[in-house]
Amino acid sequence: MPFVAAEQPKCPKCGKSVYTAEERIAANAKWHKTCFKCGLCHKLLDSTNVTEHSGELFCRHCYGRKYGPKGVGFGGGAGALSMDVGEHLGNKTTEMTNAHHSGNF
């Protein structure tokens, strides 16, 4: 009976065989060390900074940028603030003033 080599798992990034000496495991797959990098910034990853989304690898920073919360209070800065008073919700425009309200306190 002829010798038949065991089938090696394929790297999801390049499609080539991954051998035990060079494997990195994430997202239920085995990756080459050189293929184990962020999908956005291409930084090499390790077990402390890897995150996964739909089978694609990201560093924590890029994952947060791409899939993290968005909107006011989530890193938009003062440039993202809006002067919308909610007119589309039925709110009426009011004039802001520093005048003291008498008798309300």
Image (cartoon, rainbow, N blue to C red):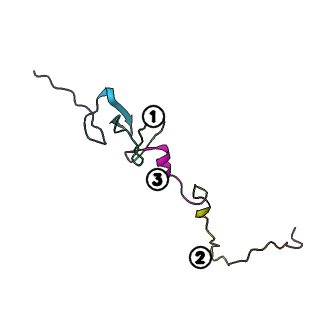
Q: Position of residue 39 (x, y in %)?
A: 39, 47
Q: Quadrant of the N terminus?
A: top left
The residue where tag 2 is placed is 88
Residue at horizontal 73 percent and vertical 77 percent from the top: 95
Q: Quadrant of the C terminus?
A: bottom right
Q: Position of residue 20 (x, y in %)?
A: 31, 27
Q: Identity of the amino acid at label 2?
A: His
Residue at horizontal 88 percent and vertical 73 percent from the top: 102
Q: Quadrant of residue 91?
A: bottom right
Is 64 included in the stretch rendered in magenta? yes
Q: Identity of the amino acid at label 1?
A: Ser
The residue where tag 1 is placed is 47
Q: Quadrant of residue 90?
A: bottom right
Numbered disc 1: secondary structure: loop
Q: Which contiguous range is marked in magenta?
A: 54-72
Which residue is the extreme one toward the top? 1
> Upstream in the sequence, badge 2 or badge 1?
1
Residues tagged 2 and 1 counted as in contact (Cβ below 8 A):
no
In this image, 88 relative to 13: left or right?
A: right
Residues tagged 3 and 2 counted as in contact (Cβ below 8 A):
no
Numbered disc 3: secondary structure: helix
The residue where tag 3 is placed is 66
> Upstream in the sequence, badge 3 or badge 2?
3
Mark nearest the camera among 2 and 1 is 1
Q: Identity of the amino acid at label 3?
A: Lys
Q: CA distance from mark 1 to mark 3?
A: 20 Å
Is 67 included in the stretch rendered in magenta? yes
Q: CA distance from mark 2 to mark 1?
A: 47 Å
- Does residue 44 lie above or below 87 as drawn? above
Q: Position of residue 76 (x, y in %)?
A: 57, 58
In this image, 103 relative to 29: left or right?
A: right
